[in-house]
Image (cartoon, grey):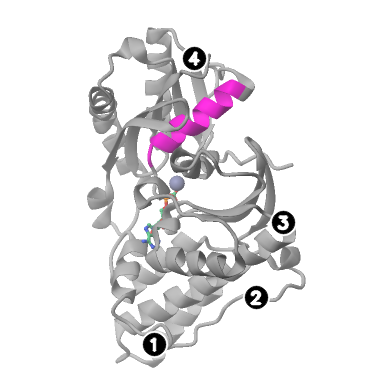
Amino acid sequence: MNDASIVLGIETSCDETAAAVVRNGVDVLSSVVSSQVEIHARFGGVVPEVASRAHLESINPVIGRALVEAGLGPHSINAVACTVGPGLIGALLVGVSAAKALALTWRVPFVGVNHHEAHLYAAFLEDPTLEFPLVVLLVSGGHTMLIEMLDHGTYRLLGRTIDDAAGEAYDKVARYLGLGYPGGPAIDALAGHGDPRAVAFPRAMMTREGANDGLDFSFSGLKTSVVNFVRGHPGAATADIAASFQAAVVDVLVTKTRRAAAQVGARGIVLAGGVAANSSLRAELAEACHRDGMRCFLPSRALCTDNAAMIAAAGWHRLRADGPTPLTIGALPNLRLDFV
Ligand code: KG4
Ligand code: ZN
């Protein structure tokens, strides 16, 4: 494995079938994402069995397209990286099986990638000059974490949600407001037409005391507050509720991320995960960082939500650090990040 390696990345942990070809861990030659959003929308959320079957149908065409768009034949691929967890077991197995088969056939290394670690690497695809230590706010459908990235592959957990993830809160509130699935983009769009000061929803665990130096999160009380408010005010404008809910989420996320960066003396702040595509979070964090004189990096929206370019990038770093992953590894639905 040398610096000129070309990695095929594969991602099937949830409801996107994705493949990408990345050179040297940073140069994206192709990135193909086939979303199942429309398939799951009528159920109001991801149905695991339906997701696995959709991945099976899409995986070969998506990989084929990634190779064609990169302008490369299979013999140019130096390694195959694939998400091994966390995620839905049946969904993960589709990608892992395809990746292992290709690695065996092409006689190249296979690299198992942690989906969370890959989200952290999305930022490096667009700015390889980012300097450590970095504070990363990882906000997705399943997780909300503040992570200190000390070096490539070395992470410290600074804070996490004690109940719902931020994306989960978006999805649940959107479903309650009748905005459909996925809820994040729907609330984001509607909030632009509402008044964020219309309802003073609670900001949980905002003090510095206790709760992991004030760096843990809680979003389930906020969701309940929205439900109670709507019951008590049936005539309230949905756009105002969406904007006020979003203001509460973003206020907590930005406050704690700034606090974490100050506590560890970070050289920069990075956003990662699906909720990092949120327009208000991006704008508020950028403005706060500007005021603090802190470097802030917001990956483009397509790299925040699930994609395979970030899998190839993380895989490239893992391969250099640890070498290939044995083909005996399976799908690991509960895989966690290793923290120091
Ligand atoms: O990282 P991701 O694509 O998948 C997981 O690994 O979970 O994140 C999906 C989550 C969903 O909860 C979705 O509602 C949320 O990210 N999301 C957003 C936005 N776009 C996606 N949340 C708020 N605003 C958005 N624009
Ligand atoms: Zn994700």
Q: Disc 4 or 2, which lies upstream in sequence?
A: 4
Q: Disc 1 or 4, which lies upstream in sequence?
A: 4
Left or right of 36? Residue 164 is right
Which residue corresponds to the image point at 32% horizontal and 90% vertical from the top-left?
236
Write down the residue under mark 4. Answer: 109
Q: Residues within 10 Å of mark 1 (few under 14, many from 20)?
A: few
Q: Hey, what amino acid is under mark 1?
A: Arg
From mark 2 to mark 1, how far is it between C-alphas? 26 Å
Q: Which mark is residue 265?
A: 3
Quadrant position of residue 319: top right
Left or right of 336? Residue 279 is left
Left or right of 34? Residue 335 is right
From mark 3 to mark 2, how far is it between C-alphas? 20 Å
Q: Which mark is residue 206?
A: 2
Q: Position of residue 251 (x, y in %)?
A: 53, 74
Mark 4 touching mark 3, by CB under 8 A? no
From mark 4 to mark 3, how far is it between C-alphas? 37 Å
Write down the residue under mark 1. Answer: 231
